[in-house]
Image (cartoon, rainbow, N blue to C red):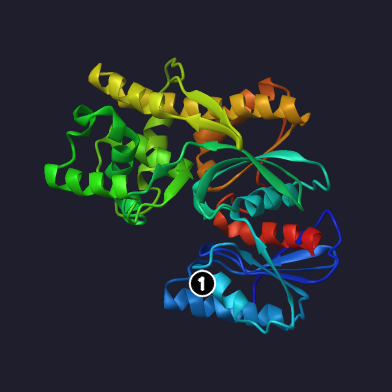
Amino acid sequence: MKFQKIKLPFKIKRPVLALGPQTKNRVCFARGNFAYLGPLHPDLTHPRDFFAFERSVKYFLKKKPGIIAYDLHPEYQSTKYALNLKPNAYQFIPIQHHHAHIASCMLENGLTRQKVIGVAFDGTGLGNDHRLWGAEFLVCDYKDFKRTAHLKEIPLLGAERAILEPIRIVFAWFFNLGPDLLKKIGLKEQRVLRQMYLSGFNSPLASSMGRLFDAAGSLVLARSKVTREGELALALERIAASYKGEALSYQFKITKDKEGYILDPLLVLKGIIQDLKAGEPKGKIAYRFHLTVARMIQKMCLILGKENKINKVVLSGGVFQNNLLLRLTLDLLYKEVFRVFTHEKVSPNDSGISLGQVAVANFKG
């Protein structure tokens, strides 16, 4: 089997086998001072990918791991597979999705026991509160994390269907602002979505940066449906990167409750609509959106850095495959004299999750 060998900044106490997430899955085995990442299994709900995943797991099980690490999400095929292994043969350790994202980047960059501000932006992953997370600020080390800030939650109307119909996400953001902003949706569907919003039926709450990009893309590009996840984010990045003029960020709100800070982007989306009505170039609007997300990160890291006396920031999650967002974020954070760490050996997307699971499990086990 072909695998990627990665040197670890610490020694593995007991051999660990990490089974990774549901999509972009890679299995990872670690022993001594090295981790071994297996091949990519794009989607474990597809039989061919699952069979390949199973072969990878069986290959690494022969190496006699002492710990099995897996994602918190009970419906992931990798999680189900882990929990069907012999219960007395291994120590089983569930790992929160976004903690694993940050840990993978820490590991790549040779960080050891320091606490960092972890910024994990992606589609979704299950949180400790059993809600869907996806725009998270964590104060963490390998062993533990605290969720200190996140994007405001909205219901994903129709759950997975909202990913392919991003106009549903727009509806959720603007529901309480009246019908004028919802003219693109047919009356019949508005009634259905209204009922889902009010009842919560098949509409899990999510704090997802990936879905915020979908909402912005739906507005700027006038698209109500897509054929695959991330389609609008890619298109939005492309037109934003083509803009060469000056631009300011949109306004946004930060509030605080007993659990931490909440970033509210409603003013951002309203600003996009105002710019569209004013006839501003779509490239400029898309660029302003990217700059605003970068400024959200800058502002939140300044707050958390001061409160926790931390100057190290780790960026991970699939949203940071967006080169424009990454560049804008790095520029702003470097100006604040943060030390910033990004991925160098594995992708920031879910294909690096199992590497992070190995690190967390090693310090928890």
Q: Name the side, left or right, on which 266 lies relative to 20.
A: left
Residue 216 drawn at (x, y percent): 36, 34
Q: Residue at the location (60% across, 53% down)?
A: 128
Displayed quadrant of residue 35:
bottom right
Residue 87 drawn at (x, y percent): 69, 82
Q: Residue at the location (53% across, 67% down)?
A: 74
In terms of secondary structure, where does tag 1 sit? helix
Residue 139 versus residue 129: which sits nearer the camera?
Answer: 129
Does 306 sit above or below residue 53? Answer: above
Q: Name the side, left or right, on which 187 lies relative to 24.
A: left
**Number of on-image labels:** 1
Q: Residue at the location (65% across, 54% down)?
A: 100
Does 291 sit above or below residue 359? Answer: above
Q: Name the side, left or right, on which 278 lies relative to 69.
A: left
Q: Name the side, left or right, on which 310 lies relative to 164.
A: right
Q: Is residue 283 visible?
A: no
Residue 194 drawn at (x, y percent): 24, 44
Name the image quarter holding the N terminus. bottom right
Q: Is residue 236 visible?
A: yes
Looking at the rendered structure, the kind of residue marked 1 is Gln
Which residue is farthest left? 187
Name the image quarter holding the C terminus. bottom right
Residue 112 versus residue 191: which sits nearer the camera?
Answer: 191
User: Label 1: few (<14), some or many (≥20) within 10 Å?
Assistant: many
Return the residue at label 1: 77
Residue 358 versus residue 180: which sits nearer the camera?
Answer: 180
Residue 3 versus residue 75: which sits nearer the camera?
Answer: 75
Residue 226 drawn at (x, y percent): 29, 50
